[in-house]
């Protein structure tokens, strides 16, 4: 009986170790590190070390502006939620203030799109024609519906 229990426990431990090891090795990137976020582009497009270094530098250079825009987008969401709360609770909306909000949101959207297009264009300039075609093909669905075109 003792030998059976030992074999059973050893099997369970081995199974648990195998299970945890598999999940640890197949865990998706969820850290905020740039290398972690750009790992897909390196493997998917088979970038050389020089190409990857250039792509990383491009993303590092654009990161502060993108983070600032993300903060503005978050602020705009909060403002919209405030407008919606006022509409629901008070039953009225300051249309001049809302028009200002809509124009500001459109300006931020245009800037986000312009920065993104610049980032995509600069990144694709570091690639061979085959890599560029694949890269733009992967990004195409993300741009559909925005009215924007990808750089050629």
Image (cartoon, rainbow, N blue to C red):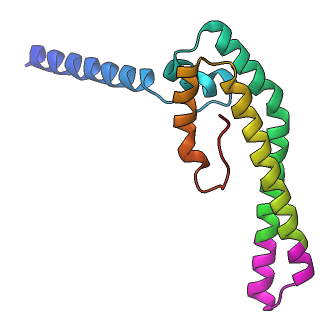
Q: Main secondary structure of the magenta part?
A: helix
Which quarter of the picture shows residue 125?
A: top right
Q: Is residue 109 above or below residue 51?
A: below
Question: Is residue 29 visible to us here?
Answer: no
Residue 107 percent coordinates (x, y)? 85, 57
Tell me, yes or no, whether the highlighted magenta stretch contains residue 35: no
**Quarter the C terminus occupies:** top right
- Residue 45 visible in this rendered orientation of the protein: yes
Give coordinates of residue 18: x percent, y percent: 31, 19
Nearer-the-camera pick, 56 or 2:
56
- How many numbered marks are there? 0
Residue at the (69%, 33%) spot, across then down = 120
Percent position of residue 62, x then y: 81, 31
Horizontal and vertical percent position of residue 98: 86, 76
Front-most of residues 9 and 66: 66
Question: Is residue 92 part of the magenta span, yes or no?
Answer: yes
Residue 20 versus residue 142 in the image, above or below: above
**Picture quarter with the N terminus:** top left
Question: Start and end of the magenta stretch?
Answer: 81-99
Name the residue at 68% across, 50% down.
Answer: 148
Q: Quadrant of residue 80?
A: bottom right
């Amino acid at each position: 009986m003792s030998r059976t229990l030992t074999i059973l426990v050893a099997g369970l431990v081995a199974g648990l170790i195998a299970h945890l090891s598999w999940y640890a090795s197949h865990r998706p990137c969820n850290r905020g590190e740039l290398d972690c976020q750009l790992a897909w582009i390196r493997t998917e497009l088979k970038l050389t070390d020089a190409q990857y270094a250039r792509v990383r530098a491009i993303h590092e250079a654009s990161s502060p502006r993108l983070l600032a825009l993300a903060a503005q987008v978050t602020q705009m969401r909060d403002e919209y939620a405030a407008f919606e709360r006022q509409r629901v609770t008070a039953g009225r909306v300051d249309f001049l203030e809302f028009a200002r909000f809509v124009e500001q949101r459109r300006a931020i959207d245009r800037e986000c799109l312009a920065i993104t297009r610049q980032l995509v264009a600069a990144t694709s300039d570091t690639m061979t024609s085959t890599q560029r075609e694949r890269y733009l093909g992967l990004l195409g669905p993300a741009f559909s519906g925005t009215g924007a075109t990808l750089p050629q």
